[in-house]
Image (tube, rainbow, N blue to C red):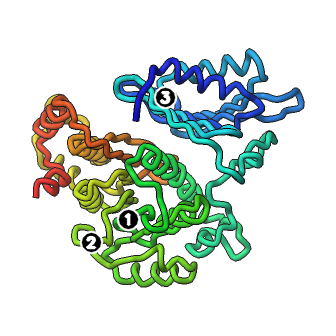
Amino acid sequence: MPTEPLGAALDRVRAMLLDPERLVRAVAAGRRRGHTVPWRRAELRYVDLKTGRALQVTTYDEAQAHTRNSAVGSDAAGAVDELLELPFGNWHVDTLDEVVQLRVTKKGEAQVHTKPREAGSDAEVAVRREHDRAKPRLLPVDDPVLRAVGIADHRGQIKPSRQSKYRQVDEFLRILEPAVDDAVETGRVPRPTPTRPLRVVDLGCGNAYLTFAAVSYLATVRGFPLQMVGVDVRPQARQRNTELAASLGWDRQLTFVQSSIEAATVPDPPDVVLSLHACDTATDEALARAVRWEAPVILAAPCCHHDIQTQLSQAEVPDPYAMITRHGILRERFADVLTDALRASILRQHGYRVEAIQFVGSEHTPRNVLLRAIRTGAVSGSNVAEEYATMVEQWGVRPALASMLET
């Protein structure tokens, strides 16, 4: 995709953000290479207050959301300029006329994709200006799949004990949505058609509540022709999930196979590979399969990290870091960070752009890191391999993913 100067592209985004009649919603997320941002995400929309229309900016840190309303005019312009000055890596802007996606490249230039609103879209509904309305969920609470997987009750209400699961489903879909859209718009994945559907594989799917949620969102909400396969080693998981897919009428677009991740076969190389909370080196097996498939999009939320943790307990720790590994709980948390950092580096060396992002809030689960990898095919710089080699040598560890990709 061609690039253009970032300043000019952001000026166009600014004009759209400051149009209180046409803006539906805008989202800023990610960060530019070599920079940090104070928020993991910022959302903008206009609301009607008693005092008049205002730009509502909601920013999300690691723990909570912060909302600020700025009156249309100079106050709103100031709020927009503050956000545009931050080194966000991506902007997604919906207006009544068009959808604009801006991504900042490694060189600090802008890749911009613009498409017109589809006829009959729900933009007019989405632009409602009510203040303090409930946050829209990508899957409504009465979606049949939520009842099927036990998150909602028979009345279509989220069960009190499953609120965190519902939140996890929503956050996962909010990560999946832009990843798929970007892959399609940039041509990394062909635009889904009945003869060439979007191909998704979930490795280590377990009870598959996120698998089912992905099918409902991608196929029903978004209308993508879809071919999805769930893989799990347990025969009872395959039987349960297959019966559930049939009860939802999805047995043609969603299939389940009983297999180890390493031995799993799928009809066609996937466009998107998911691995959500696969234990320990099962995540590495999933990443290795995805790399061998050259999957354009990988979303992996690791679970436990016993492999590197065990190696750290047996290795000679470099000075002065023994104070970290001396205590079991600190060694465990450091192993989590080190494992995922090494995984990200290995993926970069195999032609992927990688981000480690928060999946859900830590109040819902401590396993809340997700690796989002987009295949670019670009050769990583020598510094990436050098940093990786230095890290594994100093800590005396051997990542399972590295061993798997050497075979």
Picture quadrant where residue 292 is located: bottom left
Which secondary structure lies at badge 3? Answer: loop
Residue type at mark 2?
Answer: Ala
Q: Name the residue: 49% across, 28% down.
A: 88
Name the residue nearer the viewer: 225 or 279: 225
Q: Write down the residue under mark 1.
A: 201
Q: Write down the residue under mark 2.
A: 264
Which secondary structure lies at badge 1? Answer: strand
Q: Write down the residue under mark 3.
A: 88
> Is the residue marked by circle 3 packed among few (<14), some (14-19), or many (20+) residues within 10 Å?
many
Name the residue nearer the viewer: 15 or 330: 15
> Is the residue marked by circle 1 packed among few (<14), some (14-19), or many (20+) residues within 10 Å?
many
Residue type at mark 1?
Answer: Val
Picture quadrant where residue 304 is located: bottom left
Residue type at mark 3?
Answer: Phe
Q: What distance separates the C-alpha of mark 3 from that of mark 2? A: 38 Å
**Labels 3 and 1: the sequence-earlier one:** 3
Is 266 on the left or on the right of 254, as rendered?
A: left
Is 179 on the left or on the right of 380, as rendered?
A: right
Q: Name the residue: 46% across, 78% down.
A: 241
> Do the numbered discs 2 and 1 sit on residues whose CB atoms are within 8 Å?
yes
**Labels 3 and 2: the sequence-earlier one:** 3
**Labels 2 and 1: the sequence-earlier one:** 1
Residue farthest to the right?
A: 50
Name the residue nearer the viewer: 350 or 38: 350
